[in-house]
Amino acid sequence: MVSLIPVTTTRIGDHIPLLELLPADNPVSWVRGGEGLIGWGIHATTTVSGRDRFEKARQWWHQQLETFSVSNSVHGSGTGPVLFTSFSFDRNDESVLVIPQVVVGQKGSQSWITWIGNTAQPELMEVANKTKNAEFTFSEGTLSSDEWKKRVAEAISRVASSAVDKVVLARDVIATSTADIDVRPILRKLADEYPSTWTFSVDGLVGATPELLLRLSRGMVTSRVLAGTIPKTGDDEKDLALAASLARSSKDLEEHEYAVRSVAEALDPFCSSTNVPESPFVLHLANVMHLATDVTGALVETKQHVDAFSLLKNLHPSAAVCGTPRNIAFDIIDEIEGLNRGRYAGPVGWIDSSGDGELGIALRCGQIKDRTIHIYAGCGIVAGSNPDKELEESNAKMIPMRSALH
């Protein structure tokens, strides 16, 4: 008889400073406003790819769960064993699954720790000050700015002459470090400067996304859709006027409507009811403003359990990161973008043993490899787009990561 591996979850003190606890050993993170989950160490990890990668991920996670003997005195979403995930944008690239050795959670005034193995409860120490200093130099990415603008012009002509309404094109810049890159100071700076975003780190993909693809908790699902963007000036009066112009912009409202519709249609088969607000609100971040809509729904009670994997399969890729219709837009991206997105614009976050979880779209992020980090941004191209303005928007979207590296 195979002995099961103990997994223990217990309460700890109030208001744990999550990002101050991360050691350098394989840190993972999903934190917003001081709440969320962090982890370190690797109990198990794997990669999946292919059209059925979400199903493969579910199967692997359930196989791992069968090896555990769980003692959970806290209960609720994010307690017990937790899987951190970072899925690729394209099904042919590798998606990463990580089960940390230790997970620490914070929600409201409640904090908890989960650890795997027949060991004593791990001690928590504030270790974030023991980080490495590095200086970065920036260079053009896979495509030069001029070459990328040509791709945008091509996408605009495709929108005008074909059955596609919107195509999202991404670009990257490369930052090279003088030392090994430590994700911890990057996470802390992102959290300080962009407190309304979800700061994440999984296997070298680090960033702060304002877009929640999926929150599933006890049969209720929420998705925050962002599409339609305008850079901020830093002048409050001017920015208020810009926010008003964004809310009236036919180009941005059209782009936003496509994105909201794609999410609502993806959730509809799973929900007994959905709530889609009639008009978006303007989400103010430090560097840009977005049109935003929160789509919510109540899951249908069925014999077959609907979990985060089920919803991800339908939700990804949304119009916000791909286009409309998705299949045509995806083919155009594949043909003209000229960039391997990797895990940029893919789902990133965590899923617990009940299938609940929180996953965002990996935006405002970078992928670390050795001493380089590729920083990504994307723009929704519609009939009214302008290549110079799209380049300006993409640069504005890269500000959070550029700033965090400084």
Image (spheres, rainbow, N blue to C red):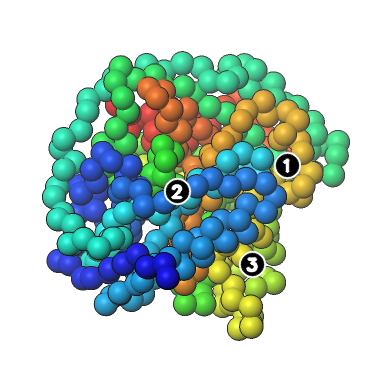
The image quadrant where one finds the N terminus is: bottom left
Indicate the amino acid at tag 2.
Thr
Rendering coords of residue 355 (x, y %): 50, 68
Q: CA distance from mark 2 to mark 3?
A: 29 Å
* Residue tagged 3: 267
Residue drawn at the location 84% of the way across and 44% of the way down: 163
* Residue tagged 2: 45
Task: Give the mark toward the camera: 1 or 2.
Answer: 2
The image quadrant where one finds the C terminus is: top left
Horizontally, is 189 left or right of 226 in the view? Answer: left
* Residue tagged 1: 330
Element at badge 1?
A: helix
Q: Which mark is residue 131?
A: none
Indicate the amino acid at tag 3.
Leu
Indicate the amino acid at tag 1.
Phe
Question: Looking at the image, which is closer to me, 24 or 264?
Answer: 24
Horizontally, is 405 left or right of 357 in the view? Answer: left
Rendering coords of residue 53 (x, y %): 63, 52
Q: Earlier in the sequence, mark 3 or mark 1?
A: 3
